[in-house]
Amino acid sequence: MLWLRHAPGPGTTVGSEVARVDVVVRQPRRINAVLVAVREFIKHAVVSGDVPARALSALYEVGDDRWAPADLGGERTGLRFIARPRHRLSAPDRPVQRSSDAAAVSLLKVCRSARDRFIVVLLGRAGLRRGETVALRRADMHVGLESTSVGCDVVGEHLHVVRREEASNGAVAKSRRPRAVPLDFLVVQAYDTYCWERDRCREAFECDFVLVNLFRVPLGQPMRPGAINELLAALSRRAGLERPVHPHMLRHAFASNVLEAGGTLDEAQELLGHASPLSTQIYLHPSPARLRAAVDNIARDQVERS
């Protein structure tokens, strides 16, 4: 842990100088991630017989739940052993950053193509991940009022997020469970405008991906996931934003807007494609205005009852 915290890796620099021994190079969150990987490798080696089992006692503190309250066990019976990692740094919670609506509008104003506008609108108003965005196929876009003619029973305009094998552009949907995401009129309008622009690129006629290269070689080929980051970074500079906008910041903004508009946690979970509601809860943080309204509502309710 000491070595991970202070030893510089190949090419590691601090400012303009090579990192010194007394300079912290890796943060606790990164160190913990490395330690998890090391423990998993050693566990595999123990199972395969390449490492003696006693090595695990140097990595884990083994205890049991015999002194835990009975209610915690639920319907499970019998003694359960618990292994806790010995080596772990305390990492402070890192707040999830979101993009403001004003920043998203600023990005749209400096877009130079219909494709770029569609990407910004799609990320901010459908909440897709970067990989899901560039993995979209044209068959996934159902922008008609009904889609029964293509065998889809979902009502209204929507898109489908489907996990497929990794494509040539390295795109793959993170969520293993397919989901349908409703689209509002702004996304549909942006997509319609982009399709006109896309159709002018003859090289893209045979490509089934929604997002393709229109202004750089290879023309007509699907965009790479990294191209989304490059685009948002360029738009952020062009718009003069103090803090550059990343793809996940727009996804965070979408999730926060859903919850602040009265959406429930399970609705946001389904829209975002989270397997667990715990992953969605990080987006549930009340704004100062909502906190003020909550306090004001208490006083108003007490006055009405009196």
Image (tube, rainbow, N blue to C red):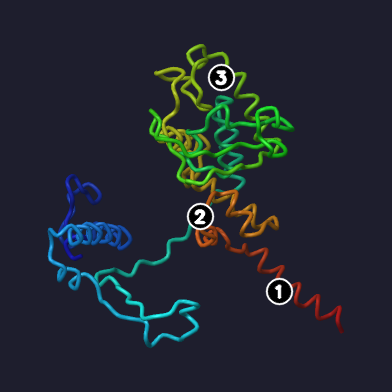
Residue 298 lies, with reference to residue 45, above or below; the image says: below
* Number of the label disc, if any, that sits on residue 275: 2
Looking at the rendering, which quadrant does residue 148 occupy? top right
Q: Which label sits in the foreground, 2 or 3?
A: 2
Q: Which label sits in the foreground, 3 or 1?
A: 3
Q: Residue at x 24, y 70 (%)?
A: 87
Residue 3 lies, with reference to residue 141, above or below; the image says: below
Per the model, the C-alpha gap separating discs 3 and 1 is 51 Å
Q: Amino acid at mark 1?
A: Val
- State the residue position of label 1: 295
Q: Earlier in the sequence, mark 2 or mark 3?
A: 3
Within 10 Å of disc 1 (Cα), the crowding (few <14, some 14-19, many 20+) is: few
Q: Is residue 62 left or right of residue 76?
A: left
The local secondary structure at tag 2 comes to: loop
Q: Is residue 134 left or right of residue 297?
A: left
Looking at the rendering, which quadrant does residue 107 occupy? top right
Q: Residue at x 52, y 60 (%)?
A: 282
- State the residue position of label 3: 198
Q: Is residue 188 left or right of residue 27?
A: right
The local secondary structure at tag 3 comes to: helix
Q: Amino acid at mark 3?
A: Arg
Q: Are marks 2 and 3 in contact (CB under 8 Å)?
A: no
The local secondary structure at tag 1 comes to: helix
Residue 289 lies, with reference to residue 208, above or below; the image says: below
